[in-house]
Image (spheres, grey):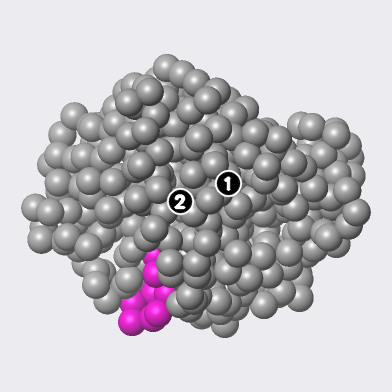
Amino acid sequence: MASFFFTFSLVFHLSLFHGSSSLPTIGITTAANAPPQPPPPPERIASTVTSLNFQAVRLPGADPSIIRAFAYTNTSLLLSIPNILVPPLAANRSLALGWLYRHVLPFYPRSRISLISVGNDVFDSTPDFSPFLLPAIRNVYLALRDLGIKKVPVSTTFSFYNIITTSFPPSSARFEEPAGSLILKPLLQFLDDTNSSFLVNLYPYNMYRLYSEIPLGFALFQDFPFNFRDDLVTGVRYKNLFDMMADSVVSAMAVAGHVNTPIIVAETGWPSSGADSGEVEATRDYAEIYLKGLVAHLRSGLGTPLRKEGIAEVYIYELVDKEGKGNRSWGILHQNLTKKYKVEFSGGFKIGRFGGLLMLVAVHFSILLCI
C-alpha cells in the first residue's frame, strides 16, 4: 500500500509539469546502404531534404560526406553506429574515440548533430550483441565528454515488436523479459541521467498485417465510424494505430519506473509496393494517406492519450526507394529524386498545453491494480 501511494504521488507530481510542449520534429531517414545504382551526391541529398522542409535527418550509415553536406544548415542529424561495432565499442573506449574522430569531431557543431544511436534493433538482427549494448553506449557517451562535446546525447534504437509483450490494450504493455530487467530498465536510467531519449521503430503497417481485426482506416488515421479501439482499463479511446502503439511504449516505460523519458520514433512509414503480390495494402495511395494523416496528427499538437506532450521526434522511412526484386518500396521519392506524394513536411513550434493529469494518474492507478 505504501508503494501504491508513493507511485500515485510521484505520477501526480510529475504530471503537473506537462503544461507546455513543442510539436514533434518531423524528420526523414536516408538509406543505410547504397542501392544498385550510384547514390545521389551528398550535396544533392542535403539540398533535397532542405527543399522538402524536413527539420531532421536520420543517417543509419553515418556517411561522413553526407554529414559534411549538412554543415551550416538548420537540419539536425541523428547518427547511427552499425550493430557490428557494438561489441568492440563496449570493450574499448579508444575505439569509440576513433569513431567520433571520423564521424563527429570534423563536422560538429557546423553540422547539427543532435543524437547518436549505438546500433539499430540489436535484439532482432544481432541478439548475441545485446549484453554489450549498454557498455557500448556508455563508452561513446564518455568518449564524447573526453572530446569536450557535452550536448550530444547517446542512445540506441529498438523495434516495437522485439521489446513490447502486448500491444493492446496499451495499459497492459510490458517490456519483454529478461531483456526488460537486464537491459531496458538500466538503459532507461542511463537515458534519464544523461538527458537522452528512448528510440523505437514503429510501423502500424506491420501491426495491421499481423492482426486481421484491425480496420485499415484505423491504421491510416482515417476518421470513419468504428475506426477506434477502447482501452477498458484506462477508459481511453484510440482513434489511430500509431497512438495505440506509442502508448504501449509509454505504459511499458511507466511500469519500468520511467514516466518522463522522451520518446523518438526512429522509423515509421507505409510502403507504396510490397515484397510480394499478397501485400495488397502496400500501394502508393495508401502510403500517401498514411503520410498525410501522420503529419496532420503530429501538427495537431494533441500528443497521445497517455503522453500529452507527445513524441519528441518522428523520422519517416525513407527518403529514396531502393531498387531490387523482393524489396518493399518505402521511399517518399523515386530513384531520380522526384516526389511520389503531395505531402508538406514541416512543423515544430511552442504551444501552450494543459491537461493530461487525470489520464496519467488513471493509467498508473490501473497499472498498479493489475500488478
Q: Quadrant of residue 318?
A: bottom right
350 up-or-down from 154: above or below: below
Count of numbered circles on the image: 2
Is 83 covered by the magenta stretch? no
Please report the residue visible at 42 percent of the width from the left and 22 percent of the height from the top.
Answer: 179
The amino acid at mark 1 is Ala
State the mark number for residue 368: none
Highlighted range, magenta: 69-78
Which residue is label 1 attached to?
A: 246
Which residue is label 2 attached to?
A: 263
Give the camera-side residue of 132 and 7: 7
User: How far apart are labels 1 and 2 at the CA level?
Assistant: 9 Å
Earlier residue among tags 1 and 2? 1
Please report the residue visible at 15 percent of the width from the left and 34 percent of the height from the top.
Answer: 92
Percent of width and height locating residue 154? 29, 49
Q: Main secondary structure of the magenta part?
A: loop
Residue 60 visible in the current orientation: no
Which element is circle 1 on? helix
Which element is circle 2 on? strand
Tag 1 near tag 2, CB within 8 Å: yes
Please report the residue visible at 59 percent of the width from the left and 54 percent of the height from the top.
Answer: 304
